[in-house]
Image (cartoon, helix red, strand yellow):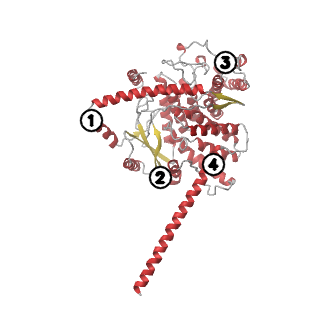
């Protein structure tokens, strides 16, 4: 799509929905973000994923198709950037510098808007609870206008007037097709409990190999898409039954099986909203909007609705936060040290009750739904500032910027086993203080650092603590969520070969943990946590040594001074 047609689309959307995303001042809490050009995916190895008891190989074809799409989008962005650069060169240099200086010198804070609950429910009705009669299996392959086949392998059809030709589809197993037909019929009759039981039967058939009519000729991609489709139907059934806790694992697994399909992420966001986990809901909605754009979604009204949902979840997360407050500050040029100090001064004046510990996030790019446009270059960037009532609540954030492998426990002896009391204390620290803050930071950060800010490693370490306390159900939910995050990471950012190997190791160990497999090797995330503990221990020894050395030097100087005074007096 060229820049001219893109501008026309934006103008049309703004005319149709002029007020939906306009901030309205109704509170004193503020916000800020850094945004980056969508990165090109470069992953050459196959990733293995699980469907029930059977492991499904996700082929390189999906990765290559995603890469080709991202390359196309990147080329479009480069063209737009070149055009803007040429336009700017034609203008007098003084005007350009004046514009940048004005944006850079003035600290503007974005006020928190208010979105009614009815708007949120409308988005869910239109995009989550789609009419079953207008829905097709997710392995239906759609084509964007450029002819590039997207990696999301299609999608459910929202507009029945634009139904494609299904003659090229692989043949579904007849028994599975019958089970799905009966389940869909019960769903339309609002017999959600019966429908859920029949979808579970269909999922069991799929896990035993009865997915497609010719199982030995079926691709791993198609099998995964069929299983993902069934998982999503279970999500909607349980949501209709008002049992989001039962829907949670199915929402995670649908993403593991088909991470590039935007509606899977939006359903996950809905489950999180029903569980009042608003920061995680905001992140899922953000990823849904990005995936919709990445896979060639051209219906701007859908993107507008997803952004509205994302914005509502951020609003709710900030409103309900008690231990911290937040400010998002837009900026136009590179962040300087004096600029950060000025932002902190503004934050201190605006939020005097949250100044015990102030953290400015420089580890990733933040963006807000009010201004983000995945097709623009460069997008609006924001600086995120968090302030805490209690210093201990935010002090752990230092490790995000100073350590490569941070560990957030207070375990001072890395070579000894945790006692049950220590495990309970660490679990509460991770679950109530650390993970909620990391989840909030990631709610406006699409592609943060994989090592430090992804939040995946912390969740897996949290799952290990739950396992020690034999809280199996919670452990399963946390690991499934981590697997969904791991499956999505390659679509959100480019990762190195080392990071690719780490991602695959984490995914394999997570699968083994869910399936109850044990081996002689320790789980990757526990090994990383041990390294982090040893690193912390060494830092502590170094600090103690330097403090002792400083005290010793001071004592010597004091003794020497006393001797000189004694000599002079005598």
Give the mark nearer the N terminus: 2 vs 3: 3
Q: CA distance from mark 1 to mark 3?
A: 66 Å
Q: Find residue 357 and name its label.
A: 2
Of badges 1 and 4, the one in the foreground is 1
Disc number at residue 185? 3
Residue 490 picture quarter: top right
Q: Is residue 128 above or below residue 548?
A: above
Determine contact: label 1, label 3, CB under 8 Å.
no
Q: Position of residue 394 (x, y in %)?
A: 51, 50
Q: Is residue 30 visible?
A: no
Q: Position of residue 387 (x, y in %)?
A: 46, 49
Q: What residue is shown with label 1?
A: 93
Q: Is residue 265 above or below residue 210?
A: below
Residue 59 place in picture, x, y as percent: 62, 27
Closer to us: mark 2 or mark 1?
A: 1
In which quarter of the view is residue 95 placed? top left
Mark 2 vs mark 3: give the one in front. Answer: 2
- For the residue carrying disc 1, how many other residues have a C-alpha within 10 Å: few (<14), some (14-19), or many (20+)? few
Q: Which mark is residue 427?
A: 4
Q: CA distance from mark 4 to mark 3?
A: 44 Å
- On screen, residue 140 versus residue 294, left or right, reads right
Of mark 2 and mark 1, the one earlier in the sequence is 1
- Mark 1–mark 4 contact, CB under 8 Å? no
Task: Give the CA separation, mark 2 to mark 1.
Answer: 41 Å
Neighbours of disc 3 within 10 Å: few (<14), some (14-19), many (20+) = some
């Amino acid at each position: 799509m060229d820049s001219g047609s893109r501008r026309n689309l934006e103008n049309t959307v703004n005319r149709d929905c002029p007020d939906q995303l306009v901030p309205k001042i109704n509170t004193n809490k503020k916000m800020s973000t850094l945004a980056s050009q969508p990165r090109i995916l470069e992953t050459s190895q196959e990733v293995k994923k699980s469907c029930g008891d059977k492991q499904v190989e996700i082929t390189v074809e999906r990765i290559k198709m995603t890469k080709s799409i991202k390359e196309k989008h990147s080329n479009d962005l480069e063209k737009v950037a070149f055009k803007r650069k040429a336009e700017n060169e034609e203008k007098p240099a003084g005007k350009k510098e004046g514009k940048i200086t004005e944006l850079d010198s003035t600290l503007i804070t974005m006020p928190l808007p208010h979105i009614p609950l009815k708007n949120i429910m409308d988005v869910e009705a239109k995009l989550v609870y789609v009419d079953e009669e207008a829905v097709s299996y997710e392995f239906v392959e759609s084509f964007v206008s450029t002819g590039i086949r997207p990696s999301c392998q299609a999608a459910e059809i929202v507009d029945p007037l634009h139904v494609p030709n299904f003659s090229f589809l692989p043949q579904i197993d007849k028994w599975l097709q019958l089970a799905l037909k009966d389940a869909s019929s019960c769903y339309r009759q609002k017999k959600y409990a019966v429908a859920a039981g029949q979808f579970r039967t269909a999922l069991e058939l799929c896990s035993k190999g009865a997915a497609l009519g010719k199982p030995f000729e079926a691709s791993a991609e198609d099998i995964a898409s069929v299983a993902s489709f069934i998982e999503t139907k279970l999500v909607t059934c349980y949501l209709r039954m008002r049992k989001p806790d039962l829907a949670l694992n199915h929402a995670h697994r649908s993403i593991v099986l088909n991470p590039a399909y935007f509606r899977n992420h939006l359903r996950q966001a809905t489950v999180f909203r029903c569980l009042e986990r608003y920061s995680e809901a905001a992140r899922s909605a953000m990823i849904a909007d990005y995936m919709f754009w990445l896979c060639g979604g051209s219906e701007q009204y859908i993107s507008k609705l997803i952004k509205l949902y994302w914005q509502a979840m951020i609003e709710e997360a900030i409103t309900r936060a008690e231990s911290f407050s937040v400010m998002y500050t837009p900026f136009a040029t590179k962040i300087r040290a004096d600029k950060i100090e000025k932002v902190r001064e503004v934050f201190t004046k605006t939020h005097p009750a949250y100044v015990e510990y102030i953290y400015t996030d420089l580890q990733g790019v933040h963006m807000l739904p009010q201004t983000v446009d995945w097709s623009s270059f460069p997008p609006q960037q924001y600086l995120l500032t968090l302030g805490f009532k209690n210093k201990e609540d935010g002090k752990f954030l230092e490790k995000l910027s100073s350590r490569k492998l941070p560990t957030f426990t207070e375990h001072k002896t890395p070579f000894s086993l945790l006692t049950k009391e220590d495990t309970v204390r660490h679990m509460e620290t991770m679950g109530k203080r650390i993970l909620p803050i990391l989840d909030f930071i990631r709610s406006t950060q699409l592609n943060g650092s994989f090592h430090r800010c992804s939040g995946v490693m912390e969740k897996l370490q949290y799952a290990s603590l739950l396992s020690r306390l034999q809280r199996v159900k919670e452990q399963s939910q946390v690991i499934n969520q981590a697997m969904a995050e791991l499956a999505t990471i390659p679509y959100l950012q480019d990762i190195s070969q080392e990071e690719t190997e780490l991602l695959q190791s984490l995914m394999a160990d997570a699968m083994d943990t869910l399936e109850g497999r044990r081996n002689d090797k320790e789980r990757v995330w526990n090994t990383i946590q041990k390294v982090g503990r040893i690193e912390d221990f060494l830092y502590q020894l170094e600090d103690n040594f330097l403090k002792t050395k400083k005290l010793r030097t001071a004592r010597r100087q004091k003794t020497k001074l006393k001797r000189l005074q004694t000599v002079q007096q005598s």
